[in-house]
Image (cartoon, helix red, strand yellow):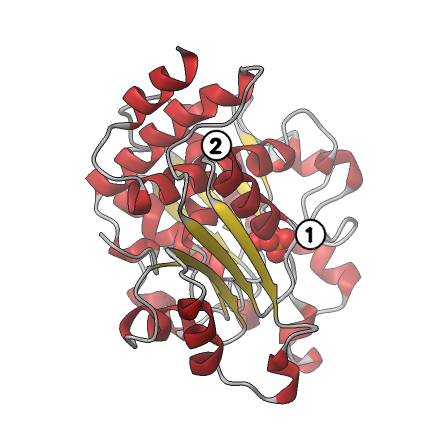
Amino acid sequence: KRHLISAADLTRDDAVLILDTAEELARIADRPIKKLPTLRGRTVVNLFFEDSTRTRISFEAAAKRLSADVINFSAKGSSVSKGESLKDTALTLEAMGADAVVIRHHDSGAPHRLATSGWIGGSVVNAGDGTHEHPTQALLDAFTMRRHLTSGTGQDLAGRRITIVGDILHSRVARSNVHLLSTLGAEVTLVAPPTLVPFAVESWPCEVSYDLDAVIGKSDAVMMLRVQRERMNAAFFPTEREYARRYGLDGERMARMPEHAIVMHPGPMNRGMEITAEVADSPRCTAVEQVANGVSIRMAVLYLLLGGNEPAVATTRTATE
Ligand code: CP
């Protein structure tokens, strides 16, 4: 595949290959020299029209660990504020010789438009588009689940019960996770207030519940989502106190999870809203680990899109020689 636009496009074999490649590449994080020469001479552009901390930094770290040249573009402070279009921005990047464009955009479908327009010749990676998808987030989430809930490399998540809680309506993370996790064999349940469940959910491969307490005791992982106040009409939202009481994760609820189960959060977190500080800082919460795993996943994605024919294992061996 030349682009990564949607988790729904990945087959089980594609997903397991990315997860296994990320496991190989994660090993270099433990070495004194963390860089591989794989993408030397290639240029990766981070094209961010929306704010980001984790995704942007980890794509930059991933590209640099593979020795690529990195250009960071932020719409704030660029000619986008003077009205320059996505097309003219893309043509400018093409003129700079971008081999891959990592794009985050407030409009659902912008990465697909970039990949199919012919404006650029390189690979396009979706780093989050509107309320549509965030495929590398789902991959790093699956990587984290696989490390905690299976015996590791080569495995999928067959039979694992994953509960995703919160603002499903506005969440590209939820949509990507539903598609990827079901491809990997997991059973996904979404939990949210009725006003924060999209109509399209009926066609998604998952269950829906409005009662967190009914499902939390049989979950292998509970993923809490940020309430995206900036994207919603206040009229459709319960009070913060009511939301936290019914859909938030506090220490008492966490204690009802199975002993092996983990708490996940893609970040950024609204502490005190969907998750208490006690839970966010507990050893069961993998939020910081997810960020670290994101670098390995993004290295794997860039490597598989741009890295040529050599297997990652061979590349890793070269680095140790
Ligand atoms: N999880 C996530 O996408 O975080 P950022 O918005 O900080 O990139």
Q: Residue at x 53, y 26 (%)?
A: 258
x then y, percent, for residue 67: 47, 37
- Identify the disc placed on residue 274: 1
Q: Viewed as shown, does residue 230 lie left or right of 9? A: right
Q: Amino acid at mark 2?
A: Thr
x then y, percent, for residue 291: 59, 38
Question: Which of the 4 image quadrants contains residue 204?
Answer: bottom left
Q: Residue at x 62, y 72 (%)?
A: 75
- Nearer-N-terminus badge (2/1): 2
Q: Of all residues shown, which one is farthest toward the bottom?
A: 83
Q: Amino acid at mark 1?
A: Glu
The CB of the residue at mark 1 lies under 8 Å from ligand 1: no
- Identify the disc placed on residue 144: 2
Indicate the secondary structure of the residue bearing disc 2: helix
Marks counted in the figure total 2
Indicate the secondary structure of the residue bearing disc 1: loop
